[in-house]
């Protein structure tokens, strides 16, 4: 059994207690890539689409790579829907929270908002405003998110598309999560 802290309320903790907690957190952070890869593998199952959710993510990343995107952006294309595994009702926000300490503000914003921007392609079928994304039109990354969705996310449901396998992207995932997480304020 692992060593445990002595406190039962945070206000009673000592520095030694927090040293133990932070060492545990560091070990957990060091294995983040493996957990993310296993979550991606969980997406390789039944789906209402013609392809699995994993294949959708692989297609988006393959498209980003083919278009010459940088490694971080390709990783974001791969992981943009990872939130489906743990939080389907707010998958964009869950994926963005996972990625935030490791990616640029631009890529974080795109992943955070891609769900709303994807609404352009389906909201009108439900008498909703497909241009709801326009509430963010003054944001500096607005067009980047439109481009992400138009080029990589919304067309990536094609069973005939030649997609790179997950193994192709594993080094990219490992590299991303090997970065020192940025402190969030």
Image (cartoon, grey):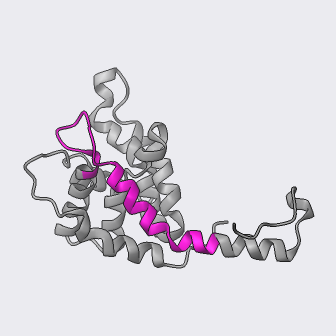
Percent position (x, y) of residue 117?
Answer: 36, 44
- Residue lying furthest front in this view? 1
Is residue 8 shown left or right of residue 112?
Answer: right
- Residue lying furthest right in this view? 12
Assess whether residue 43 is covered by the magenta stretch: yes
Assess whether residue 28 is covered by the magenta stretch: yes
Q: Nearer the viewer, residue 33 or 156?
A: 33
Percent position (x, y) of residue 154?
Answer: 24, 46
Residue 121 occupies which quadrant of the picture?
top left
- Number of numbered discs on residues: 0
In this view, 132 is above or below 31: above
Percent position (x, y) of residue 4?
Answer: 77, 66
Name the main secondary structure of what is drawn in magenta: helix
Magenta segment boundaries in residue numbering? 25-54
Residue at 70% in and 69% down = 2
- Residue lying furthest top in this view? 127
Q: Image quadrant for the N terminus? A: bottom right
């Amino acid at each position: 059994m692992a060593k445990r802290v002595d406190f039962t309320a945070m206000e009673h903790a000592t520095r030694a207690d927090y040293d133990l907690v932070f060492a545990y957190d560091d070990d957990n952070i060091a294995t983040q890539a493996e957990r993310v890869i296993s979550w991606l593998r969980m997406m390789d199952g039944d789906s209402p689409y013609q392809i699995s959710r994993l294949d959708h993510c692989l297609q988006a990343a393959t498209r980003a790579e083919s278009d010459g995107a940088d490694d971080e952006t390709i990783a974001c294309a791969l992981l943009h829907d990872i939130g489906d595994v743990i939080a389907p009702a707010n998958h964009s926000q869950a994926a963005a929270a996972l990625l935030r300490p490791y990616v640029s503000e631009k890529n974080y914003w795109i992943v955070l908002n891609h769900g709303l921007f994807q609404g352009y392609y389906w909201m009108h079928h439900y008498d909703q405003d497909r241009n709801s994304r326009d509430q963010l039109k003054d944001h500096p990354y607005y067009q980047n998110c439109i481009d992400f969705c138009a080029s990589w996310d919304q067309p990536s449901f094609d069973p005939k598309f030649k997609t790179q396998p997950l193994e192709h992207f594993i080094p990219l995932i490992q590299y991303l999560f090997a970065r020192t997480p940025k402190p969030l304020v």
